[in-house]
Amino acid sequence: MVWSWWELQSGGPVYDIPKGRKDGRRSKVEDTLIAPAPTFNASELVRVFGLRGFSAQDMVALSGGHTLGVARCLTFKNRLSDPVDPTMDSDFSKTLSKTCSGGDNAEQTFDMTRNNFDNFYFQALQRKSGVLFSDQTLYNNPITKSIVKGYAMNQAKFFLDFEQAMVKMSLLDVKEGSQGEVRADCRKN
């Protein structure tokens, strides 16, 4: 039996994730710190994702998940220091500076459609308007630039590759036997 996460939401790609996966016995924020840093460059991202069996294309597709939501100033304010990150559009740097005037927890959307799953994130990278350094670097690196361009022009291709990469990710670190549990209430640690 499978369920389609995006069918539960509005719009975006639809993909099936196998049911019955066991959760770890703990759910702590510090366990998520293995995520790549927002200061990583494309080569570092390719390497880190590669260690988990993902290709550069998988990594770029998964990065497209940033089309939803926001980043806090704390994660990108280093790009605004003197000198300002030269890979960023000057008007966009002013937008980020204005956001950060609200403090480290001030939020900036990744693209202009924060609640829609689409390819606008990749179009923003082409305009030098990636919020995180780790986002913008995808357009500045010759290995990943052509993938970004492809997704910016072809949303259907992005959706397909994202779906495949998410299913691949769902197969990482599967808990078996006594290593995990099926939770009745996922909100409880």
Image (cartoon, helix red, strand yellow):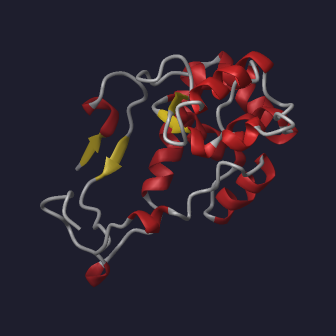
Say above or below: 100 vs 188.
above
State the residue in front, 3 or 131. Answer: 131
State the residue in front, 26 or 2. Answer: 26
Query: Is 154 situated left or right of 93 in this image?
Result: left
Query: Could you tell me how many numbered marks the image carries?
Result: 0
Q: Residue 81's quadrant in the figure?
A: top right
Q: Residue 101's quadrant in the figure?
A: top right
Q: Quadrant of the C terminus?
A: bottom left
Residue 26 in percent (x, y) is at 31, 73
**Residue at the left extreme, as displayed:** 184
Q: Residue 20's quadrant in the figure?
A: bottom left
The residue depicted at 68 percent of the width and 30 percent of the height is 130
Query: Is 156 situated left or right of 91 in this image?
Result: left
The residue depicted at 43 percent of the width and 29 percent of the height is 13
State the residue in front, 149 or 45. Answer: 45
Residue 92 in percent (x, y) is at 71, 20
Residue 104 in percent (x, y) is at 54, 42
Say above or below: 114 vs 25.
above
Say above or below: 67 vs 142.
above
Residue 45 in percent (x, y) is at 71, 52
State the residue in front, 53 or 70. Answer: 70
The residue depicted at 26 percent of the width and 47 percent of the height is 2
The residue depicted at 47 percent of the width and 46 percent of the height is 166
